[in-house]
Amino acid sequence: MQQDAGAQGVQMPAAIYDPGEVGREDHNTGDRFVVGLSNVFAWLFPILMIAICSQVVLRQAGHNQAWLDDLQWWLYGAAVLIGVAYAVTTNSHVRVDIFYDNFDRKRQARIDVFALAWCFLPFAILCWDVTLGYAISSVVANEGSDSPNGLHNLWILKVLLNLSFVLLIVAIWAAYVRRIKVLGPITTGRLLVWSFPAVMFVVNLAFYYVVYVYHFVTLPEGENPRTITRKPIFDEFDLGPWEIKYTIVIPLALTLALIGAAIIRDARRAK
């Protein structure tokens, strides 16, 4: 929607029904996916309101329903988890930087690139990694409600928690690509260099999981899986006064090799 400012002829964007429509012309595929999925999950809020009002009425009538209490947390949790990614895409989160609005477009883009790729993206990847075991253990235990009459299969919500961080990562990366485009042409090497901490983190996690799964699959029969982390690959070596893990050094070398290969490929394509 657009509102005409009158005699001045200035058009001001107004997105009362969907902030995701603001700046749509700059959105990439990732942005539109996040906005579209978030608009679907937004319908959970009116359903949540109905659930809350119904529980209040039933409780006052002496017919308290435990499953309705659980349903409220499920609906609220699912909507908010998805809403975080939506806020990143639409830039509708709360900003505490009082100087940002007065900066020129490129300076704003540099700030956004640093905040997204160097701070927020590694944090989101860490949260995904931490909640992965949380979700898997809930599925294995077939976790349910504490109340006999509550909603069972609580593992569904905990799996959604982990998946919401995947969506958040998509939203951050899409916003990062959109903002770095303001600073110049997009190339694979440039994207990887400007997001080095996040790339390093992803390579580190991938390397760790591949090595762990390999040792788990080849574990001798009867041996405790806890012994996997005692394998030589998980050891440390001395570098002067520091003790450094192989699982840090090897991923670092792989990350540098990956970025180097991307830069060489970009240079060849530019010829």
Image (spheres, rainbow, N blue to C red):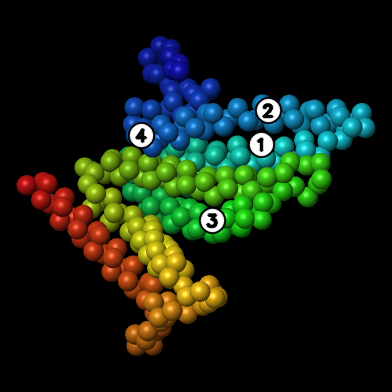
Give the mark nearest the N terminus, 2 or 4.
4
Question: Local crowd at mark 1 within 10 Å, few (<14), some, or many (≥20)?
Answer: many
The amino acid marked with disc number 3 is Leu
Residue 239 sits above or below residue 22 on the image? below
Q: What residue type is labelled 1?
A: Leu
Q: What residue type is labelled 4?
A: Thr
The answer to whether the residues at label 2 and label 1 have Cβ atoms under 8 Å apart is yes
Residue, disc 4: 29
Residue most extreme to the top:
7
Residue 59: x %, y % from top left? 88, 33
Secondary structure of the residue carrying numbered label 3? helix
Tag of residue 47: 2
Q: Which residue is drawn at 81% across and 41% down?
A: 149
Among the two numbered marks 3 and 4 on one chain, the one whose residue lies closer to the N terminus: 4
Decide which of tag 1 and tag 4 comes sooner along the chain.
4
The residue under label 3 is 132
Q: Name the residue under label 1.
A: 75
* Residue in the image at 44% along x and 23% along y: 13
Q: How far apart are marks 2 and 4 (CA)?
A: 29 Å
Find numbered disc 1 in the image and state the secondary structure of the residue it sits on: helix
